[in-house]
């Protein structure tokens, strides 16, 4: 039976980054993906500065110009169809197409000696946790460690019987003039505990919305939002699930099986940002596997959960602020406040979202401290 040190289900940023880090450490790895790269992927494609820093640090030699399609320097907030304010953060927001970004990461992984099996649709019954093997076609491929990086609705979660807590997003494209302004647009008040967006790409706006809810209700909300954004019809509308931020129970998973990225439930519940957490969790998974392999008695999943505590702590704090922000009286007051006071939103956009210099746990305290010092001068 053919065997690898690590099999990785899913070749998105979480799976690719896991493979890249493990290849650097001398492991034999193989990514299994149901599609063939390059392939389309539903995603807003926003890369924050902290995401770019992560790519630069862990993928030296990877040229951002190979996957960045646009840059945004302004952020517009809308509420109930009306512009609240325009913000000019001191940070750049980078936009990519997942077809390009994912393919470039996969190529980087292959350049470092990784293997990939494409167009392989694994079923739930093909994963044999007790045998440490996966059936591919009619043959079994063995592994010492297994990484699930195939998203919210992936086969890893189903085989591991992980109870999910995901939100539905609907997204499509609107044509745009590439010579006109390249602002990010955020629309509040269009979904329960969620928002709508318009992200500039090379020749179109990627527009979509997501939030708490499902099925017909959310689709009706999305249609109303799309009509609000433009008189032109939104094209190629598709749906996908993203993590809500609620912690998933993984204690029953075998100690040599690790979920990463969306499969692990990692996404910012306030903004929906997932690419940063996908790549970071892949790196943390590789470190856990490496530490476990040095001492075979060490539980890789437990090590990973310890490593990933930094992610869960941030997401847990974000969930708290999500509940505070979307409490109706607070939300209305906050939207009104933003019309005349930009500083708090700018601080959040720059220090929390873009760079990660401040966490959800401490950003209010740091902001108030800096604000107090500025006023006392």
Image (cartoon, grey):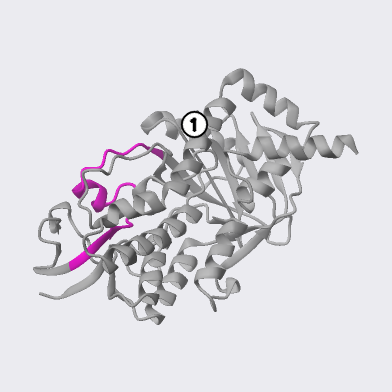
Residue 120 in picture, x, y percent from top left: 23, 66
Question: Callout 1: helix, strand or loop?
Answer: helix
In percent of the image, x 42 and y 58: which residue is there? 41
Q: Which residue is mark 1?
A: 221
Give the answer, above or below, for where 117 lies relative to 272: below
Pick the front one: 43 or 2: 2
Asked if residue 226 can be seen in this view, the reply is no
Give the answer, above or below, for where 137 lies relative to 130: below
Give the answer, above or below, for where 112 lies relative to 356: below
- Is residue 290 covered in magenta? no
Residue 322 in picture, x, y percent from top left: 54, 31
Position of the N terminus by quadrant: bottom left
**In this image, 146 relative to 352: left or right?**
left
Residue 160 in picture, x, y percent from top left: 21, 47
User: In the rendered image, which quarter is residue 39 located in?
Assistant: bottom left
Neighbours of disc 1 within 10 Å: few (<14), some (14-19), many (20+): some
Pick the front one: 314 or 328: 314
Residue 94 in picture, x, y percent from top left: 62, 59
Residue sitting farthest toward the top: 329
User: In the rendered image, which quarter is residue 360 located in?
Assistant: top right
Position of the C terminus by quadrant: top right
Pick the front one: 234 or 158: 158
Residue sitting farthest toward the right: 377
In percent of the image, x 27 and y 71: which residue is there? 30
User: In the rendered image, which quarter is residue 341 located in?
Assistant: top right
- Is residue 149 covered in magenta? yes
Total residue callouts: 1
In percent of the image, x 15 and y 56: which residue is there? 129
In percent of the image, x 17 and y 55: which residue is there? 123
**In this image, 172 relative to 133: left or right?**
right
Q: Which residues are magenta?
A: 143-167
């Amino acid at each position: 039976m053919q065997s690898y040190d690590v099999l990785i289900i899913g070749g998105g940023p979480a799976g690719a980054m896991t493979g890249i880090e493990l290849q650097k450490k001398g492991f034999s790895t193989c990514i299994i993906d149901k599609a063939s790269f390059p392939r389309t992927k539903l995603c807003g494609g926003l890369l924050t500065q902290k995401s770019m820093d992560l790519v630069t640090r862990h993928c030296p030699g990877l040229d951002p110009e190979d996957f960045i399609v646009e840059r945004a320097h302004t952020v517009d907030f809308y509420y109930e169809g009306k512009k609240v304010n325009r913000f000019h953060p001191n940070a750049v927001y980078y936009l990519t197409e997942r077809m390009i970004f994912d393919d470039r990461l996969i190529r980087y992984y292959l350049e470092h000696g990784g293997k990939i099996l494409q167009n392989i649709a694994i079923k739930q019954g093909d994963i044999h946790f007790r045998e440490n093997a996966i059936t591919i076609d009619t043959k079994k491929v063995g592994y010492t460690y297994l990484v699930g990086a195939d998203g919210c609705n992936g086969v890893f979660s189903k085989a591991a019987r992980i109870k999910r807590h995901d939100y539905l997003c609907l997204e499509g494209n609107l044509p745009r003039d590439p010579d006109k302004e390249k602002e990010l647009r955020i629309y509040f008040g269009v979904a329960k505990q969620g928002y709508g967006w318009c992200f500039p790409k090379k020749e179109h706006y990627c527009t979509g919305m997501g939030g708490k809810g499902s099925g017909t209700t959310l689709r009706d909300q999305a249609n109303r939002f799309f009509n609000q954004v433009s008189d032109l019809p939104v094209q190629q509308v598709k749906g996908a699930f993203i993590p809500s931020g609620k912690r998933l129970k993984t204690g029953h998973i075998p100690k040599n099986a690790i979920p990463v990225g969306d499969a692990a439930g990692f996404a910012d519940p306030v903004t929906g940002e997932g690419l940063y957490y996908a790549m970071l969790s892949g790196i943390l998974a590789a470190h856990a596997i490496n530490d476990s392999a040095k001492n075979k008695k060490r539980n890789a999943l437990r090590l990973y959960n310890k490593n990933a505590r930094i992610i869960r702590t941030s997401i847990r704090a974000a969930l708290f602020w999500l509940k505070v922000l979307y409490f109706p009286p607070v939300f209305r007051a906050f939207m009104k406040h933003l019309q005349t006071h930009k500083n708090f939103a700018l601080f959040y956009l720059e220090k929390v979202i873009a760079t990660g210099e401040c966490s959800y746990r401490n950003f209010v305290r740091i902001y108030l401290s800096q604000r107090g010092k500025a006023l006392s001068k």
